[in-house]
Image: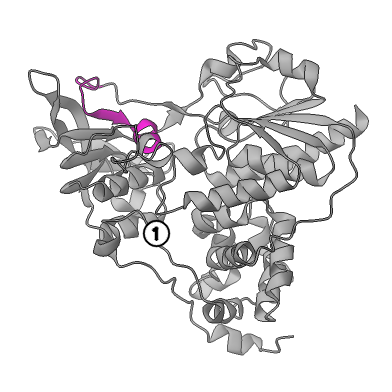
């Protein structure tokens, strides 16, 4: 048991995450962050003040008992830390890598008031990876079967989390996934250098070992409908995400060389188009790539373009870096890797040649005015500031919306004006026994918020099955 005093804890500086050097990693798809050693993890864990009123737990969408698993690390009990973490979080290897901790658990850490918060995300990743490497992912004893069957639609973060939680409660769970591999945005959207696919596969394997069944290449709305599943299962959880791209609606957007970000990333991440020798899926390798947007997806796309060999990979964003919704770490990593930031710039038109191939992006300079509804200062065009940015590939990363494939075949499902499924406080839709969560309810959001929805829905489904 550690006996380090609060004063001694306060004197320990936040430990830095070892990582690949910027320009070196911009030429490969290997993971950027290399992970803590046990020595660094224990030192960082000692910074935790073990607050009685742990605000970090309230800041976590999946309610991980953060002080508890960190105390296990401090005491050198990594097996205890892994068991504690796995009891709260179905996908700790994943959330430890891609969760925006700076806005959530670390944003609530009391140490952040006078310095830097505890590196909770790095510690979570360390423990989860340690358990994975030890083959001790803390598989719990199989619960007694309840005899109840639950269908989960979508094998993304919300669906996988819900399935794991439901399996722990003894329910018979089947996931239906439209693509050929489970993982959703974890495999088609987030690049290898941020989230290795072997990590996702290992987390999925852990769920299948716990009894979760996964059927891929099943499109709900085409292969089966919601009413058909209702006839076979006691409850449903819809977590098919919001994967329909949003475009800029500017002239030339249908030229050859323009990608929606999710198509671009899916080709590279899930279909391995970066490996031209062995992959059958092509992708344009532009020499000058312009990515429009300032979120995490835009950062993923522009950093991918750099790794594919772009001489110049550019972010085109209508505000400044300070207003970018992307994680600060992703923006920092992009800058280290040589990404060019075209800030206070808004696209007006995609320029092409006589064969409709992209040759440039006509843009306009912007300046920031008063804050808009998002709280960010609204960009205003600067008169007479138009110019053409030379590029041969344009990737549009300005958001996604709900795909109507599923909902169009079930008109009884109540939707909001954006086409997202409406739910009550328990995550239940307008159909009894049919629940929903993640991006299909929220609109495009983060992995950890989807995981939180999955965990909450699993608890609500369990309650429903006990009373149905």
Residue 257: say if magenta: yes
Which quadrant of the view contains residue 352?
top left
Give 393 or 322, whichever is nearer the viewer. 393
Q: Residue furthest front?
A: 278
User: Residue placed at 44% from the left, 45% from the top?
Assistant: 190
Q: Where is residue 307 in the image (x, y as percent from the top left)?
A: 27, 50
Give 199 or 226, whichever is nearer the viewer. 199
Residue 405 visible: yes
Residue 51 visible: no
Which quadrant of the view contains residue 267?
top left
User: Residue placed at 60% from the left, 68% from the top?
Assistant: 130
The C terminus is located in which quarter? top right
The N terminus is located in which quarter? bottom right
Vertical order, 414 against 32 (above or below): above
Residue behind mark 1: 329
User: Residue placed at 35% from the left, 48% from the top?
Assistant: 323
For the image, the number of numbered tags is: 1
Q: Where is residue 415 in the image (x, y as percent from the top left)?
A: 61, 19
**Where does the magenta region start and end?**
250-266
Give 95 or 138, whichever is nearer the viewer. 138
- Helix, strand or loop for disc 1: helix
Residue 419: say if magenta: no
In the picture provided, is 212 more to the left or to the right than 440? right
């Amino acid at each position: 048991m550690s006996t380090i005093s609060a004063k001694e804890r306060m004197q320990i500086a936040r430990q830095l995450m070892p990582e690949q050097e910027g320009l070196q990693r911009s030429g490969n798809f290997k993971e950027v962050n290399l992970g803590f050693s046990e020595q660094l993890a224990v030192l960082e864990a000692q910074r935790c003040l073990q607050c009685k009123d742990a605000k970090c737990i309230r800041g976590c969408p999946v309610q991980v008992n953060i002080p508890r698993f960190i105390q296990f690390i401090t005491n050198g009990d990594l097996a205890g830390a892994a068991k504690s973490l796995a009891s709260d979080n179905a996908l700790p290897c994943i959330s430890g890598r891609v969760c925006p901790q700076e806005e959530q658990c670390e944003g609530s850490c009391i140490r952040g008031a006078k310095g830097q918060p505890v590196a909770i995300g790095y510690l979570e990743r360390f423990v989860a990876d340690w358990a994975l490497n030890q083959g001790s992912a803390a598989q719990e004893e199989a619960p007694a079967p309840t005899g109840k069957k639950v269908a989960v639609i979508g094998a993304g973060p919300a669906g996988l989390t819900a399935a794991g939680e439901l399996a722990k409660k003894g329910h018979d769970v089947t996931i239906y996934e439209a693509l050929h591999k489970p993982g959703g945005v974890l495999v088609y959207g987030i690049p290898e250098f941020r989230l290795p696919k072997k990590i996702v596969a290992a987390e999925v394997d852990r769920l299948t070992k716990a009894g979760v069944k996964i059927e891929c290449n099943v499109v709900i709305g085409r292969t089966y409908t919601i009413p058909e599943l209702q006839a076979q299962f006691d409850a449903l959880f819809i977590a098919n995400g919001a994967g329909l791209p949003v475009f800029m609606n500017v002239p030339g957007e249908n030229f050859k060389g323009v990608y929606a970000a999710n198509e671009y990333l899916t080709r590279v991440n899930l279909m391995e188009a970066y490996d031209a020798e062995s992959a059958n899926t092509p992708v344009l390798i532009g020499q000058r790539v312009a990515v429009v947007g300032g979120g995490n997806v835009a950062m993923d796309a522009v950093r991918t373009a750099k790794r594919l060999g772009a001489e110049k990979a550019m972010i085109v964003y209508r505000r400044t870096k300070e207003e970018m919704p992307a994680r600060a770490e992703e923006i920092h990593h992009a800058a280290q890797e040589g990404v060019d930031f075209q800030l206070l710039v808004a696209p007006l038109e995609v320029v092409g040649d006589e064969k409709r191939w992209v040759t440039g992006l006509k843009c306009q300079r912007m300046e920031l005015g008063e804050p808009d509804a998002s709280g960010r200062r609204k960009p205003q065009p600067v008169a007479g500031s138009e110019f053409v940015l030379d590029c041969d590939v344009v990737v549009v990363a300005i958001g996604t919306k709900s795909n109507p494939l599923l909902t169009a075949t079930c008109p009884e499902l109540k939707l909001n004006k954006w086409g997202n499924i409406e739910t009550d406080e328990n995550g239940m839709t307008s159909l009894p026994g049919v629940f929903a969560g993640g991006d299909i309810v929220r609109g495009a959001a983060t992995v950890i918020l989807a995981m939180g929805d999955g965990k909450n829905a699993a608890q609500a489904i369990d309650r429903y099955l006990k009373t149905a």
